[in-house]
Image (spheres, rainbow, N blue to C red):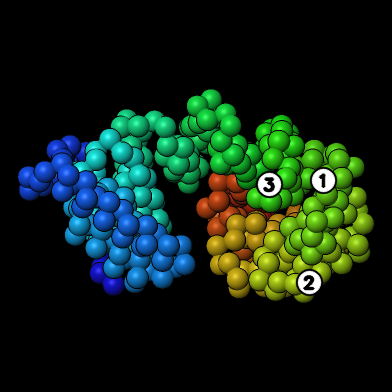
Amino acid sequence: MRKLVGPALALFGIALVLGCASTQTVKPASEEVAKEKRLEAEKNYSIGAGYYAQRNYDAAMENFQRALEMDSTYYDPYIAIGNIWRFRRDPIQAQEYYRKAMKIEPRKVKAYEGLGDLFLEMSGMDSAYTDSALAIYKAGLRMDSSLVDLYSGIAQIYVKTDRMAKADSVYSEALQRFPDDLGVMRLWGEFLYKMRRYAEAVEALRPLVERFKDDPSVVPLRVKLATSLAETGKYNDAVAELDEVLKVDPTDRQALLAQGVILARQRKYSEALVKFDQVIEMDSTETTAYVSKADVLMKQGRLSSAETQLRKALRFDSELASAYASLGDINREQGDAARGKNLTATPKEKLEQAKTYYQAAKSYYQRAMADPAYYSYARGQIGYIDKNIELVDKELFVR
């Protein structure tokens, strides 16, 4: 695989793309010959698309390339080949084909979407690509504001960079432009759900679920709606939504997880644990089940057992913010217990132990802050911990 390009080269590429709007030069040909070549190219592209759908990328690439040999001005094969190189994690080749497509049809936006998505994926390795992706998406919108995926890409960047007000604004604009688009409605509802704006999530998800109730892809949204209802205290409505899901599929793990959460909210801890264990038995990699189970164990005061569950979750997802937030809570509680209510009456060893727990809690909360959904909570907890460490240090100083 080729080495990834650096941020400077990526940004240079953007300038090259945005500054070049000329069409590709082709040899003169009669209209009839050109039409025949395009028809042959479309046949090859169609065959390639069939292989692509089957994930036979070698055969797909061969047919896409053949289509370009027949007609080098054919836009769609460039996008398809760029997507294959992106899948193969060769960003240099992927960029080359997206840019060729832009030169041929600068006002078509699929190439902007593909290149923006590529840079967004690469931003995990270097944050400079985040700005590159944003510039490309915005350039695509200037060319054609009718592609909903460009709005989605921009909103994802704003969420990623903790610019929630801007993300909110982008989603609102997309909803106004595409009021009947299931993708936009879904992304908006899921954004609200992720941000724990549960009352708003209910308002966004309920009409979506009712409108597309016969669409299988809406099932996960029904679970999110049920969870949001539970978060707002409407347990009966939440149960009714989950019952609809489980009627169709009694083994739906997300519905079972949501049931467990509701049972836990009602302090039916033993029943909740049964639901979470059912999910883990079906899929031992389901991190949410471990985190949810840990939450119940924490409520029961079984902190050691809760920590074991969180460690299991982190084995499958080392960046799981919810697990780090819960580990922070466990260590914070242990720090509070060791510190005691009266610092002057607490033995020195206990104060030192409390400080160790607080420092561990702070490190976990700092990991949780990487997720915008946990940023505010973790920051608040870190403030609480810093004050307590300061008090403990002062007391230890005079001992």
| Residue lying farthest to the front in this orientation | 32
Position of 382 with respect to 137 (left or right) is right
Camera-side residue of 172 and 88: 88
Q: Which residue is mark 1?
A: 241
Q: Is residue 61 visible?
A: yes
What is the number of callouts on the image? 3
**Mark 2 or 1, closer to the camera:** 1
Q: Residues within 10 Å of mark 3 (few under 14, many from 20)?
A: few
Q: Quadrant of residue 321?
A: bottom right
| Percent position of residue 327, x then y | 67, 62
Cα gap from disc 2 to disc 3, whole angstroms: 40 Å
Q: Which residue is mark 3?
A: 215
| Percent position of residue 145, x then y | 39, 30
Position of 15 with respect to 155 (left or right) is left
> Residue shown at 68%/67% (left/top)?
286
Circle 2: element type: helix
Q: Which mark is residue 305?
A: 2
